[in-house]
Amino acid sequence: SAVISQKPSRDICQRGTSLTIQCQVDSQVTMMFWYRQQPGQSLTLIATANQGSEATYESGFVIDKFPISRPNLTFSTLTVSNMSPEDSSIYLCSVRRMNTEAFFGQGTRLTVV
Amino acid sequence: AQKITQTQPGMFVQEKEAVTLDCTYDTSDPSYGLFWYKQPSSGEMIFLIYQGSYDQQNATEGRYSLNFQKARKSANLVISASQLGDSAMYFCAMRGMGDSWGKLQFGAGTQVVVTP
C-alpha cells in the first residue's frame, strides 16, 4: 500500500483567509487527486493534479478558489482560498497505485469560523 | 454518466454477525472497477477491497468479500464476523475508463454500528 502523509490533520481558520494542505507520497505517482467531503456527505472530486501541467478541475470547482501545485511526482498542495464557513469540510488527497488500488491520505478536517 | 447508489443510510449489526452493505451502479463503460472504503470517525479513508468488471471471481480480503453480480449491476460488501471496530461509514466507489481513469465516484455511504 502507498504511504500518504497529509497535513495539517485539522485546522480552524478565520473566514477570508487561505489554508494550504500538503500531500506527500512515499513513491512516485503520475496522478494525484483532491477530494472534498462536506459534513455528512460523500466525497466529491475537486481536481486531478498531474506533474508538470495545470490541474484539471471538476465542474463546480475553479482554480482561483482551489489552486493546486504539483512540483514533483511525490508531492502536491491544495489551497483553499478566501475561505467561508461553507468551505468547512474534510479535504483528502488520493493516489492510484496500479489499476486496482486507490489510497487516501489521512484527511484535513477544516473548520472555518 | 456513471452513478453509484447506496440505499442504506444506516445499519445496526450484532457483534460476530455478518452484514451485507448494498451498492448498485450504472455505467456505459465496458471496463470499470469497484471499490469499497471504510471511514471511521477520524475521517481517514481505508481501502478495503476491489472488484474489476472482468474479474471472474468475487473479490475477498480477510473478513471482507464482495458479492459481484454484473448483470444486476450490484457490488455488495459482506463483512463476516463483525467486530466493534467495524463501526464506521462505508463507501462504495467506482472508476471508469478513458478520461475518467483514476477518478472515483462515490456513493452516499452506509453508517454501520456494531453492537455488543
Image (cartoon, coloured by chain):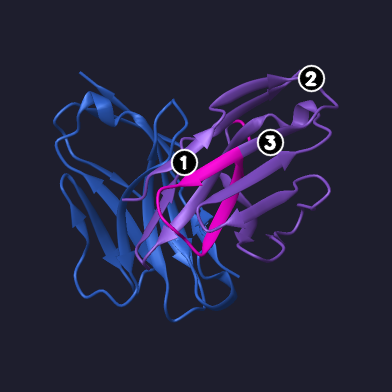
Chain colours: A purple, B blue
**Outermost residue to the front:** A72
* Disc 3 versus disc 1: nearer the observer: 3
Q: Is residue B76 above or below residue B88?
A: below
- Where is residue A6 drawn, in percent x and y? 51, 37
Residue occupying the point 19% across, 56% down: B60
Majority SS type along the magenta span: strand
Q: Amino acid at mark 3?
A: Thr
Residue occupying the point 82% across, 23% down: A15
**Left or right: B80, with B42 as reference point:** left
- Where is residue B4 drawn, in percent x and y? 50, 58
Q: Is residue A36 magenta?
A: yes
Q: Secondary structure at mark 3?
A: strand
CB-based contact (under 8 Å), mark 3 and mark 2 = no
Q: Nearer the viewer, residue A79 or A43?
A: A79
Q: Chain of mark 2?
A: A
Q: Which mark is residue A20?
A: 3
> What is the tally of numbered marks visible in this picture?
3
Q: Quadrant of the C terminus of chain B?
A: top left
Identify the mark nearer the N-term, 3 or 1: 3
Q: Which mark is residue A8?
A: none
Which residue position is annotated with label 1? A105
Q: Is residue B36 magenta?
A: no
**Left or right: A57, with B1 as reference point:** right
Q: Is residue B81 above or below residue B93?
A: above
Identify the mark nearer the N-term, 2 or 1: 2
Magenta range: A22-39
- How crowded is the residue under tag 2: few (<14 C-alpha within 10 Å), some, or many (20+)? some
Q: Chain of mark 1?
A: A
Q: Secondary structure at mark 1?
A: loop
In whole angstroms, how far apart are the C-alphas of marks 3 and 2?
Answer: 14 Å
Which residue position is annotated with label 2? A14
